[in-house]
Amino acid sequence: MPKLCPSAQPGMDQCRVLGVIQQEGPRPMVQYLKEPLPATPEILGMAAPLKPTEVFRLAATCAERKCPHFDGVDCRLASRVVRILPAVVAELPPCIIRKECRWYAQEGGAACKRCPEITTVTYDLSPRSGKCPACQRWRRLRSGNCRNSGIARLRSAQNRRNLLCACSRTAKSRALRSC
């Protein structure tokens, strides 16, 4: 049976919703679903005006050699997640794909304890954009401009990079609400 990627993009083979990203608290956290839900265009469309990956955490069949994170044997993304990020839960969270999950098969429970914090979102961080991506997406129907315009990248004590919204000085998860 093929392994499942817990950090998939819409359109991947056998794509399903793994959970919903909750934007409350200091960082986004995934609230896992209790039953499988296919990631149909109708379901993914419910995320509008945001991208589906800003609202849903998706799982799909691992693309293996077609994926830039796959080295032919292991998922390097799973390895980096376990090596760099601290655990965010003490016990393994409920998960509908654990038996088939590539990250769990490779890294065990250590990956699961970091998994709720993982989001699959890509921002345009180019300096020429002049707009905070979080504000731009959230306020797409309005002007989209940040009050102070720009993005600040800071390194935390764990040497992780956290994207901060410069206009409100809040973490990315709060930037979507407060800008």
Image (cartoon, rainbow, N blue to C red):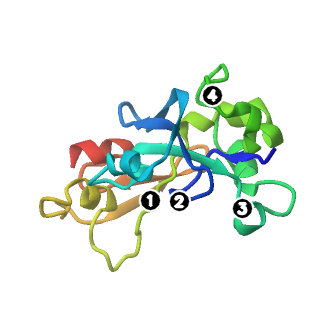
C-alpha gap between disc 1 and disc 3 = 23 Å
Q: Which residue is drawn at 19% across and 63% down?
A: 144
The image quadrant of residue 150 is bottom left
| Number of the front mark, 3 or 2 | 2
Give the class, few, some or many, for how many residues have Cα within 10 Å of label 1's Cα (few <14, many ≥20): few
Q: Along the polypeptide, which appears first: circle 2 or circle 4?
A: 2
In the picture, the disc for residue 59 is none
Q: Which residue is drawn at 45% across and 43% down?
A: 56
Q: Along the polypeptide, which appears first: circle 1 or circle 4?
A: 4
Q: In the picture provided, is 132 more to the left or to the right than 142?
A: right
Q: Is residue 147 above or below residue 82?
A: below
Q: In the picture provided, is 61 more to the left or to the right than 151?
A: right
Q: Tag 3: residue type?
A: His
- Say whether residue 1 is visible: yes
- State the image coordinates of residue 7 (x, y, percent, origin top left): 60, 49
Q: Tag 4: residue type?
A: Cys
| Number of the front mark, 1 or 4 | 4
Q: Mark 2 points at which residue?
A: 11
Q: Residue at x 75, y 38 (%)?
A: 100
C-alpha gap between disc 1 and disc 4 = 32 Å
Q: Name the residue under label 1.
A: 153
Mark 3, secondary structure of its residue: loop
CB within 8 Å, label 3 to label 2:
no
| Number of the front mark, 1 or 2 | 2
In the picture, the disc for residue 95 is 4
- State the image coordinates of residue 122 (x, y, percent, origin top left): 46, 61
Q: Along the polypeptide, which appears first: circle 4 or circle 3?
A: 3
Mark 4, secondary structure of its residue: loop
CB within 8 Å, label 4 to label 3:
no
Q: Mark 3 points at which residue?
A: 69
Q: Along the polypeptide, which appears first: circle 1 or circle 2?
A: 2
Q: Along the polypeptide, which appears first: circle 3 or circle 2?
A: 2
